[in-house]
Image: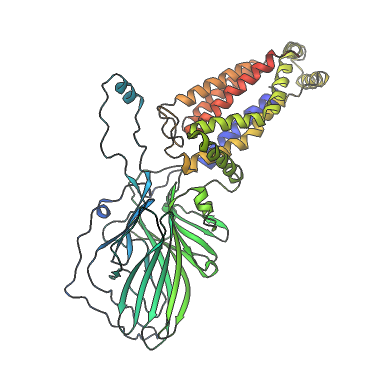
Amino acid sequence: MDKRTLLAVVLSIIVLLVYQNFFVKPPVKTAPTRQETTVASQTARPTPAATTAAPAVATIQPATTGRLTAVQPVTGTEREVIVETSLYRAVFTTRGASLKSFQLKQYKTEVADSEDLVDIFMRMIGRGKPKPEGGPKPIELIHVSEGMPRPLSVSFPDSTVDIPGDGFYEAGSSLLDMTKGGESRRLIFAQSYPGELKVEKAFTFHPDKYSFELEVRVHNLGGAPLNQNGGLTWYQYVDPAAPIDSYGHDGPVSYIGKNIDRPEVGKMEADKTLGPNVSWGGFESKYFIASLIPQNPSLTSFRMTKDGNNLIAVGLKGPKNVIPPGQIGLFNYSLYLGPKDYSLLKAQNLGLENAIDFGDWLKWLAIPLLIILKFLYGYVHNYGIAIIILTILIKLIFWPLGNKSYKSMKEMQKLQPLMVALREKYKSDKARLSQETMALYKAHKVNPMGGCLPMIVQIPVFFGLYKALLYAIELRHSPLFWWIQDLSAKDPYYITPLVMGATMFIQQKMTPTGADPMQAKIMLFMPIIFTFMFLNFPSGLVIYWLFNNIISIGQQVYINKKPA
């Protein structure tokens, strides 16, 4: 086997090993609920009003440790408060001034109007089934079971007064409708303990952003200073029966000290605190994130807990505030609840774009490729066509390198009779055969490694594009045509990977492999190996490799027909 063939085999094995070890994640025993599920039934329907006999205000009694004891929850009537923009529909509850639902209007749970080939054929002959009514539902970011605490709960651990998170608040409005744009609007929840303190949660929403702000105000109405330490928590129920996405991560995520951390839910500790220098933290799925952003990262820690009821809690804990009598203590947060869109996350200026799993090294290729794809999409309005155009552009960049490679192959083909003669002459002396073969290459100025150079150069581009197509939300549910309705998912009928394998076989037949029969058999297995590997790859990536092969075949035919 010559060195060029050996290198091709080694490269193929490396590709397989890298794919298996870095791109295929083993399933975990505990399967977290995907944030792409629809809202749970207990949160989808309106909650009946919960009332008590008479609203009561709890008294605060001194504790023996020098702290004041925790107060009892303020009682009252639970009602919903709706915030609606063109991007999302948020449903708050006056119990804890927390979130019951947060639906992303522009993202659906499944591909809209998707049909398989059978449906298309039956519809063409007039015997198709009517399309189901309603269509896909919007993405729901919140999933908690009845009786569990809800996201955006505010607590005051290690404080003079620990106010319960499930007390009732009075809301300043029942509906904020910003679907027609306009200015930012505020929603204020308040609860009071007369003579002691008053708590306000003031949300500021923007009609054209997934981000909003939360200001927690603690009014000291008593006669002694209060030491308050604010905490903001996001709760997410984990469904053990939910399907596992081996390519994505559903669970806690944080960006602390310029490092990303995303522990597997099944391997989480019961209680863990990280920090300080917390830029942000939250709960993520493959394409969406609920992130909590502190005002003072250097003084904030990030806490993750998991209980026996499969409830995950992630939250921020900040520094203590000393609130003099008659003064107000402020705890400020920002929140981003929405898609992992690189441009949107980058605009936050907080390192939120690191939530997209492009990888530490490959992101320097994945991000530029994604930017170019989005630029091309702006003109062709089809990401599949944009991928094909990008393939052509990449091929043009490597065109001179390809010409050199194919010329080297052509020269190698001419040397095949001489190499056969050498093998026959020195078949019992391997060392002498190797020396004479290299001398033959040198005499005819042929580089046996020249044919592998384009593959070596394109491997980083391949993996960079792999990351871009797999994790960029722009490709999610983005169609090419007909049966390919999601470029981020595998081809449901395996048509494109099989055609891609056929093009690799054609390339293999056009490539000289020497006179060694064993070498020819090994190289013949390459298209089979790659076809098997590509079966579960995103269809967008398969389209890239398929058209790259087609262009390469055309280039090689052109070089072979060109006179020497």
Q: Residue placed at 43% from the left, 28% from the top?
A: 481
Q: Which residue lies furthest to the left in this view?
A: 53
Which of 95 and 7 lies nearest the eye of the viewer? Answer: 95
Confirm whether residue 521 shows in the render. no
**Number of disc labels:** 0
Identify which residue is drawn at 47% across, 76% down: 320
Expressed as whole percent of the image width and height from the top left, the position of residue 195 reads 32, 85
The location of residue 470, given as percent across then percent down, is 49, 40
Q: Height in image: 34 above or below 477? A: below
User: Left of 390 or right of it: where is 150?
Assistant: left
**Would you identify the image quadrant in which residue 76 lies?**
bottom left
Q: Please determine whether, in this image, residue 121 is positioned above or below residue 338.
A: above
- Location of residue 271 in the rendering, given as x and y in whole percent from the top left corner: 43, 63
Q: Is residue 281 visible?
A: yes
Q: In this view, does 227 lie to the left or right of 61?
A: right
- In this rendering, the answer to whether 223 lies above or below 205 is below
Seen as rendered, the residue at the extreme bottom is 223
